[in-house]
């Protein structure tokens, strides 16, 4: 099962909605990563085998540079409503495995 980690750019409402659906999710606050470097988020998520959901394009650059990660879901800022983002993450959770997400980017 996919577990998610939301960086601090993703609205807390997304985490609440995912938790209400029984999906395991951490936030930057949960992980004591507020204001942490993107590399720290990736290291945390990799160690925990969590897919990062973010609006931050810096994660795309880290992926391109070969930084290992457990998966990234990237959503350009304001391109999706909170509800659309939640529905997309639920779909990813239902259709993909953690193994399929490792080192992979899903674009919303």
Image: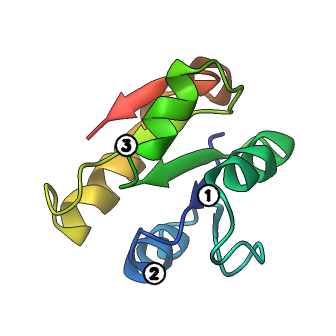
The image position of residue 82, as x and y in percent, is 25, 70
For marks 2 and 1 on the same chain, the one whose residue lies earlier in the sequence: 1
Q: On the image, which quarter does residue 57 sit in?
A: top left
Residue that appears at 50% across and 41% down: 59
Give the alpha-carbon distance from disc 2 to disc 1, as whole Å: 11 Å
Residue at the location (67% across, 21% down)?
99
Circle nearer the N terminus (2, 3): 2
Q: Is residue 75 above or below residue 72?
A: below
Q: Are marks 2 and 1 in contact (CB under 8 Å)?
A: no
Residue 94 visible in image? no
Quadrant containing the C terminus in the rendered view: top left
Marks 2/3 in contact by CB < 8 Å: the verdict is no
Helix, strand or loop under label 1: strand
Q: Which residue is mark 1?
A: 5
Q: Is residue 92 left or right of residue 63?
A: left
Q: Is residue 63 above or below residue 32?
A: above
Q: Which residue is mark 3?
A: 74
Q: Position of residue 85 (x, y in %)?
A: 28, 58
Which residue is tagged 2? Answer: 12
Q: For residue 73, say whether it is visible.
A: yes
Q: Residue 60 versus residue 92: which sits nearer the camera?
A: 60
Q: Quadrant of residue 19?
A: bottom right
* Element type where label 3 sits in the image: strand
What percent of the width, then of the height, locates residue 41? 69, 55
Q: In percent of the image, x 58 and y 19: which residue is there? A: 100
Q: Is residue 66 above or below residue 57?
A: above
């Amino acid at each position: 099962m996919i577990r998610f980690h939301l960086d601090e750019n993703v609205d807390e409402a997304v985490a609440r909605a995912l938790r209400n659906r029984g999906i395991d999710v951490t936030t930057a606050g949960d992980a004591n990563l507020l204001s942490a470097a993107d590399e720290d988020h990736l290291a945390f998520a990799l160690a925990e085998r969590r897919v990062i959901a973010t609006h931050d394009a810096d994660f795309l650059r880290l992926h391109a540079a070969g930084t290992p990660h457990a998966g990234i879901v990237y959503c350009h800022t304001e391109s999706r409503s909170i509800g659309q983002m939640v529905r997309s993450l639920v779909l990813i959770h239902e259709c993909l495995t953690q193994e399929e997400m490792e080192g992979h980017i899903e674009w919303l």
